[in-house]
Amino acid sequence: MLGLNKTDSKFLLIVILLTIFTPILMQPFAANSGLDQFNGGYPDLMQKVAIFGIFAVGFNILFGLTGYLSFGHAAFLGIGSYAAVWMFKLLTMNVIPAILLAMIVSGLLAVVIGYISLRRSGIYFSILTLAFAQMCYKMAYSVLTPITNGETGLQLSLSDPRVLDGATTSTSLPVTNIFGLAMNSSYKVEALNRVFTFNVGFYFCAIIAIIAFYVAIRLFRSPFGMMLRAVKSNQQRMNYMGLNTKPYTLAAFVISGMYAGLAGGLLAAMDPLAGADRMLWTASGEVVIMTILGGAGTLMGPVLGAGVIKYLENIFSKINETVLHSWFHWLPDGIEEVVVWIFARFTGEGWHLTLGITFMLVVTFLPGGLVEGLKRLARLARKGRKKTDKFDESDPDHTPPPSKHVV
Amino acid sequence: MGILEVKGVGKRFGGLQALGDVNLSVQENTVHAIIGPNGAGKSTLLNCLVGKLIPDTGSVTFDGQSVLGRKPHEINQMGISRVFQTPEIFGDLTVMENVLIPCFAKRDGSFRMHAYESIEQEPDILQKAEQMLIDVNMIDKRHMNGSSLSRGDKRRLEMAMCLVQDPRLLLLDEPTAGMARADTNNTIDLLKEIKEQRDITMAIIEHDMHVVFSLADRITVLAQGTPLVEDTPDNIKGHPKVKEAYLGETQEV
């Protein structure tokens, strides 16, 4: 299917199905069941998962394949948002030109930053990209204020030209749309004591995410993808094999920058507002954590990582002390205070602590990320089901021989 | 006129004159060995040939074209492949992929953005790589990771990666360094096989006399950055200057 082999086609099909049914799958708890605050099936969260999934998949093309750890990818996310909002202001509220411009502008910025940063590798490359991103962030606050609107952030206003949309007499701000279908419109279905929200914005992001994911699969399986993995493995060998590593790394950098710009454009398309904070180094760090948490160098890992982090961020940060009190009200007074105090450190404002612990546990026990965990589970399940024959020997790379005892 | 002509090459590192005035001519379809004691400048010479170092003086031409000032990947594209002292392979990639990469490099040049094709849709290249692995007897290991191979197999794989490019000149930098006797003999057999089956020119830098005398058609002895003698293996064996270079001058008591 579409130039993919059987396994990949099946894989892509599963991803498509999961994406289509996300509004249902992320609503597992019935209303009033007490657990309904763990439901993630509301548009804002689902959109974020899809968008940051794209961001992380793109980041993984650079980091997972070539091993170059960029600490400045938020710059592309930010510039993508600015480009998209400018498109909404000047041209039209249709999201298609906006995300196209976001990709082009971020791609151009990636050529410049990549060309300079890729002269170094390892930690020096990371620091260079970090420096560039922080420069972009500072410039968005200071000298570029006419373009970025500084601290307030770039917003829509009624006086914007929007040449393609024509003059309106409306007194409220227009909404982003795709050929007239508003991004924030939703179709709600009440069934099984749950409310399922099918949101236009989410499905738009989902379609883009599936296309982005498909492109990533093709890239992983292509000779180009193999060359990128070779860059990570042994650049010297590549050079003496007649291959110039520089254009390969630059191409990977620009592609992943354009993925980030696309994600930034989509963020603006869901909520037409762009602020410099999107370029802050914490945002660059977030995508690194997403990729490593899910599994760097794997196809599904970054999406999984983005999903877990955005879920934790949105769900755990909502659990405040009032909610905790309602959970533990059956405990004796003194103990309840203590338990609520402890849990409050990990929820609400403290959700970063939960994220940190999760990250530490995953990196320590599953160096390959959550994907490795899933693979291990799958292997366990397979072992339990059928006997292995001599052709089904365990993979020697993943089951190293037990270490010799130290006397 | 040889396929590789080295004329008057000199290289200085600070106060050390690593190469003095090296003249060397490697004839097509021969195995030319460069031997010499430690510090004779063998590796420096090799690095000048592949673009890792640029000599201070002299010229290096391959097939009539100068290689000086060219980058390693450009020199490889001219038809020179190099085997390293410690096998340099792609440890994170499978054996098959290790051989596929030089195939693509040979066909598509130093860079091509072939991001939309799948490797499975390249039957010619796949077949070429498979044939190469059959030739070096590694086809059953094609799904193994490069890093999990034994040292001998890594050497064999590296050789396959170079040979699959059909290089006109194969440079070998101490291919048996640090190997056990059995592995050394295997490598000699492999190189002999290659020599017999292909029209290939090889330049070997080597410490091990056993290897040199079983393979080489011509030998250049290098000492203190200058070539002492160049001759056939038989004539080199008893040459007094060679003994002197290796064992030191005979001193009168």
Image: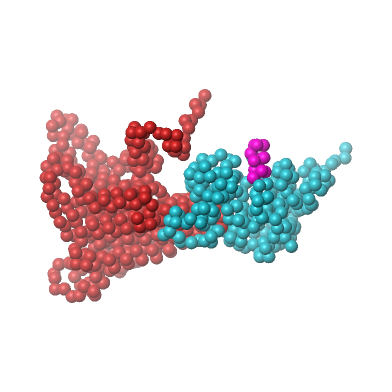
Chain colours: A red, B cyan
**Quarter of the figure that contains the N terminus of chain A:** bottom left
* Residue closer to the observer: A356 or B45: B45
How far across and how far down the image is residue B198, in percent? 65, 53
How far across and how far down the image is residue A145, in percent? 31, 66
Q: Is residue B92 above or below residue A270?
A: above
Q: Is residue A368 above or below residue B222?
A: above
When asked about the image quadrant of residue A327, the answer is top left
A203 inside magenta stretch: no
Residue B76 makes an appearance in the image: yes
How far across and how far down the image is residue A296, in percent? 39, 47
| Residue at the image point whose x is 33% and y is 57% from the top | A212
When asked about the image quadrant of residue B116, the answer is bottom left
Residue A140 makes an appearance in the image: no
Extreme residue toward the top, this view: A407
Q: Is residue B186 above or below residue A137?
A: above
User: What secondary structure predominates along the stretch shown in magenta?
Assistant: helix
Does residue A317 appear left or right of residue B245 in this picture? left
| Residue at the image point whose x is 18% and y is 34% from the top | A337
Q: Is residue B74 above or below residue B218?
A: below
| Residue at the image point whose x is 33% and y is 33% from the top | A385
B181 inside magenta stretch: yes
Residue numbers of the magenta segment: B180-191
How far across and how far down the image is residue A150, in percent? 29, 63
Count of marks placed on residues: 0
* Residue closer to the observer: B88 or A87: B88
| Residue at the image point whose x is 19% and y is 56% from the top | A199
Extreme residue toward the right, this view: B253
